[in-house]
Amino acid sequence: MTHPAPPANPERRRLLRLGASVAAAALHAPGLTGQRPLRVRFSHVVSEDTPKGLVAQRLQALVLQRTEGRIDVEVYPDARLYGDRDEMEALHTGAIDMLAPSLSKFGRVGFPEFEVFDLPFLFDHLDAVHRVTQGAYGHRLLAGLHRLGLVGLGYFDNGFKHMSADRPLHEVADFRGLRVRVQGSRVIAAQMRALGARPVPLPFSATREALAKGIVQGTENPLSNFWTQGMHEVQPHLSLTRHGYLGYAVITSERFWSRLRPADRALLQTALSEAIAYGNRIAGAQQEKALTALRAWGGTTIHEPTARQRAELARVVEPVHAELGQRIGPDRIRELHRAIGA
Ligand code: SIN
């Protein structure tokens, strides 16, 4: 079965046109500065027509326009250059300059405090996430990236995750023994184990194939990732569990960042903040678009858990919160709840 092309995106086309015309202008006017553009290589693992893909493109277009092509943010989507296993290393060695890993991927590189974002059934709404990411709590986490020579430039959303599998997932018992692809987050793995499932950490770019081959039987994703990866073609059941959040931190290396002129750093940071604000505005619509496409496609049965079923899932995974509290300190968890306003 072939993967239907994701629906056309007028905003993306507009941005690409804008980027292309500015890039063309830059190419044809080398005499303006007499220098080759400064390249900022931005690598990511998802498709272009996702919140992250669109944030990267918006950044590219804004920077090209404002510098008249002097700075070129080159975007490499779909793990074309680097994937989950080697992108951090590539950032450290200077092979790339910017990344936006999911917050779930910071724990395994030494920042377990980021795994608070993986806690199941923690956030009811994206506003609650933003109270954390845009407040003192979120800023402190980004500042802490300094420990590994990284600079945290900002957060943005993908959305809420849902479970999919080769079988319907209604009740906790349905998860028993299910091999589930997870990101490399101890919180997510613990959550799957609490449900009786068997977590299998795999890079994002390997997930669809692992599902197709039956190496894993289920996974969790926001709808935009599920649809644009064609996972619906290999997952006959999707349960709209909305059990967790997936978001990103944009990072660069101190080495790269400190070499930029202060004015260029400010320009990049401003453009990124605007691209992030745009991404957060469209993230919800991207999920809706994917859900509409999935319904129209019709090959995946979409289940809506009842309030009782969802409450039971939440009850079973609740101990994962205390477990993380033991690793990062119960004060951190209390502070997190204060930030959320819960
Ligand atoms: C991403 O959205 O960057 C990928 C998340 C995942 O690995 O599931």
Image (cartoon, rainbow, N blue to C red):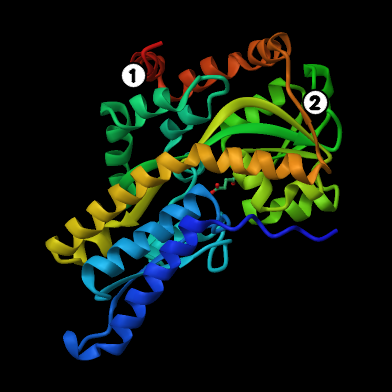
Contact between labelled residues 1 and 2, with CB atoms less than 8 Å apart: no
Q: Which residue is mark 1?
A: 339
Residue 141 occupies quadrant: top left
Residue drawn at (15%, 66%) of the image = 261
| Image spot of residue 36 (x, y percent) | 27, 84
| Image spot of residue 182 (x, y percent) | 66, 40
In the rendered structure, which amino acid carries the disc numbered 2?
Answer: Leu
Residue 168 occupies quadrant: top right
Which is nearer the N-term, disc 2 or disc 1? 2
- Check the image and name the residue furthest to the left: 262
Residue 95 visible in the picture:
no
Residue 130 visible in the picture:
yes
| Image spot of residue 202 (x, y percent) | 67, 48
Residue drawn at (13%, 61%) of the image = 262
Q: Is residue 114 left or right of residue 66?
A: right
Label 2 element class: loop
Mark count: 2
Label 1 element class: helix
In the rendered structure, which amino acid carries the disc numbered 1?
Answer: Ala
Residue drawn at (35%, 26%) of the image = 132
Q: Which residue is mark 2?
A: 169
